[in-house]
Structures are given as C-alpha cells and as structure tokens.
Image (spheres, rainbow, N blue to C red):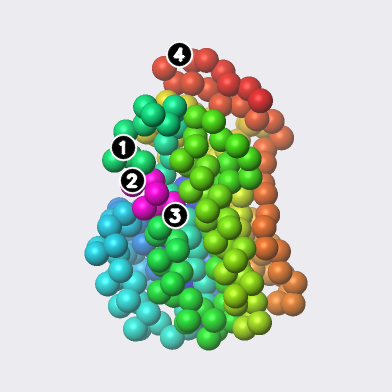
Amino acid sequence: MKSAIVTGASSGIGLEISRLLLELDYKVYGISRYTKPKQIEHDKFVAVSSDLSEEKDWKPKVEAILKEEKELSLLVNNAGIGALGLHEEIEYNRLRKLLELNFCLPILLTRLCLRRIKENAGLILNISSTSALKASPIGAAYGASKAGLTSFGQSIFEEVRKTGTRVVNIHPDITRTHFFDELNFQESEDRETFLLPEDIADVVKFIIERKKELVITDITIKPQKHRLDKKRHNKELTE
C-alpha cells in the first residue's frame, strides 16, 4: 500500500491534504504536536504526536515509520509558523522556533526519507509561501525561511530527477488557517482576499494526477485580491 508522511496534519492545509490522500488510497502518517484530529476518522490515518521543533522527539518516530513502511512514496513538508513585525522586536525564541520548523525540519526530514522516496520514484511536496518570492518587510525571517525551503526543493529536484522522483514547491498566498492565531494580523473577511486549505489540497491533487514525465517544479496560488487586517487597531493593510 502506498504511504505518505504529512507534517502539521492536525489542522489547516496539512489536514486537508491528509484527507485528500486518504481519498486517493494512501496510508497517511500525520505528524503534529496534537493528537489525532477529530475531523479524520479513517483506518488508514496514523496520528503521530510529536514536537516538530525538537529533533530528538520527531526523529526516532520517523525512523520507526521508515522501518515499517517500504512503500513510502510521498512526503509533505507542511508544518510551519509565522512571525510578523519589525525584526528587532520579534521574540528571539520565536525566531529560533520559526527557523527550526520552517527550514531545518523539512531539510532534515527529507534527508531521512529521501532514499526510500527515490526507491519508489515518489513525490516531495514543500508547502512554501509567496513570501519566498519577494521582499517581506515585517516578515523578514519568515520570508527567508520559505525562500530557503523553495531553493532547497529546486536543488533536490535536480539531484533526484533521474530516479523518477518529483519535487514540487507550492507557494500559497494568504490562507485562512490557524497561522494567524498568534500574530497581530489576520486575513480580511472579504472572501476574495484569502485562500482556503481545500484550495491547496485541490492543487496537490492536480500535481499528483499529472503524468510522470511532466513535472511542475513550482506553483503559486493567490486569491483575487490582497488584504490583511491588523487585529489590535483594526487597520487595513493593502498592497
């Protein structure tokens, strides 16, 4: 049975991608800090509770999965957090955690899983961000972490393409998830200004269903309009 690992699978984009993969008959190992999400009741979903910012916690659990799963063919590097504000004002430990989750984790996790995925001519999906593609004032570290992830994905594809393995960077713009819960900004209420996690899952389905000899290495998804609202002062930020 084909199997997949999805990080940050308990909510948002990771949850919707997990649902999609179950529909496509994958066995899904959903790794997140929370226990099994109530929204998924499926015998092919295996919830793996782990602090993904701590390698000593998640690494042995992934190694156990690899020992058991010879058919692992899909890795979704989705877990991540944000930090918006002037760089000098963002809490130091928040920045460290951001870099661990957004940049170090996918690189190290890919290192552990890559040989198995190559053996199965599989697929690696990196959930990056439009922030990776431009200057990101008030989000410098976040943008840098995602730019690093995108560059990593592009380079790894060149390493593994001869094995039939695909690597795709997905760059979503503002998406309605828990991403903004701990930030001073949030998506606008205007439906044309944000994406839904289901939209990203639809793109993942599109990628999976492409013929093997065609590889989309990078894909960007945006809502029709761009706007963020500042929570504290209800001040709109428009591009």
Q: Earlier in the sequence, mark 4 or mark 1?
A: 1
Label placed on residue 103: 3
Q: Residue 218's quadrant in the figure?
A: bottom right
Q: Which residue is mark 4?
A: 233
First to last magenta residue range: 96-102
Residues packed near mark 4 inside 10 Å, few (<14), some (14 to 19) or many (20 plus): few
The residue labelled by disc 2 is: 96
Give how far across and how far down residue 129 sits, in percent: 57, 46
Residue 92 shows which numbered tag?
1
The residue drawn where x is 31% and y is 54% is 53
Instruction: Answer yes or no: is residue 25 visible.
Output: yes
As measured in the structure, the alpha-carbon distance from the residue carrying label 2 to the one carrying label 3 is: 10 Å
Q: Is residue 137 above or below residue 122?
A: above
Q: Amino acid at mark 4?
A: His
Q: Nearer the viewer, mark 3 or mark 4?
A: 3
State left or right for residue 210 relative to residue 129: right
Q: Nearer the viewer, residue 86 or 192?
A: 86
- Drawn side of residue 170 relative to residue 46, left or right: right
Residues at marks 2 and 1 touching, judged by CB atoms closer than 8 Å: yes
Q: Secondary structure at mark 2?
A: helix
**Magenta: main secondary structure:** helix
**Amino acid at circle 3:** Phe
| Residue 75 painted magenta | no
Asked whether disc 4 touches disc 1, contact meaning CB atoms under 8 Å apart, the reply is no
Q: Identify the element where label 1 is drawn.
A: helix
CA distance separating discs 3 and 4: 31 Å
Classify 10 Å Cα crowding around label 2: few (below 14), some (14-19), many (20 and above): few
- For the point 34% across and 83% down, the residue is 67
Residue 179, image x and y in percent?
44, 40
Label 4 with label 2: CB-CB less than 8 Å: no
Task: From the viewer's side, name the closer residue of 214 and 188.
Answer: 214
